[in-house]
Amino acid sequence: MKVSSRAELRVAFCDDRESEGALRSLLPDNEPLPAGLSIGMVREGNVLVTEVTCERGVDSLLATLDDLLASLNLAERVLCSRSRIVGSEG
């Protein structure tokens, strides 16, 4: 019996520009994917929505989510600190 697991992450950024930057920084990491794993990402304004579907078991889903969260954390730190620096110059 094939079991499919699905998870959705919704991460709100400070503004649309930051969510776009996060999307662009993460997309290259999602290709190529192993068989049985799919990742979709879209922006809804300042929110980055990531949907992960996995037919490789819950452990694989959790490992994928962990990788995504680590990448999102890094993107947020870089983009938000960049915004603060740029904002302080103006």
Image (cartoon, helix red, strand yellow):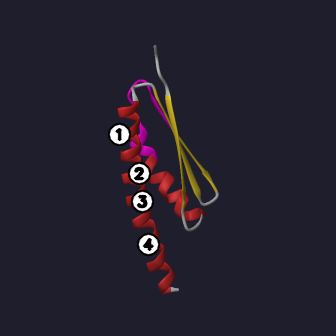
- Of labels 1 and 2, earlier in sequence is 1
What residue is pinned by disc 2?
69
**Residue 5 image offset from top left, x and y in percent:** 49, 30
Local SS, label 4: helix
Q: Can residue 74 be seen in this snapshot?
A: yes
Q: Residue furthest top?
A: 1
The residue mark sitting in front, 4 or 1, is: 1
Residue range (magenta): 27-39
User: Which residue occupies the foreground of this view, 87 or 65?
Assistant: 65
Q: In what element is the residue under mark 3?
A: helix
Looking at the image, is mark 4 or mark 1 earlier in the sequence?
Answer: 1
Nearer-N-terminus badge (3/2): 2
Mark pair 4, 1: CA separation: 29 Å
Give neighbour class at mark 2: few <14, some 14-19, many 20+ (Cα, 10 Å). Answer: some
| Residue to which mark 1 is pinned | 63
Label of residue 33 in the image: none
* Upstream in sequence: badge 3 or badge 4: 3
CA neighbours of label 3 inside 10 A, class few (<14), some (14 to 19), many (20+):
many
Residue visible at 35% across and 33% down? Answer: 59
* Residue pointed to by mark 4: 82
The residue at which mark 3 appears reads as 75
* Marks 3,4: beta carbons within 8 A: no
Q: Amino acid at mark 2?
A: Leu
Q: Amino acid at mark 4?
A: Arg
Q: Earlier in the sequence, mark 4 or mark 2?
A: 2
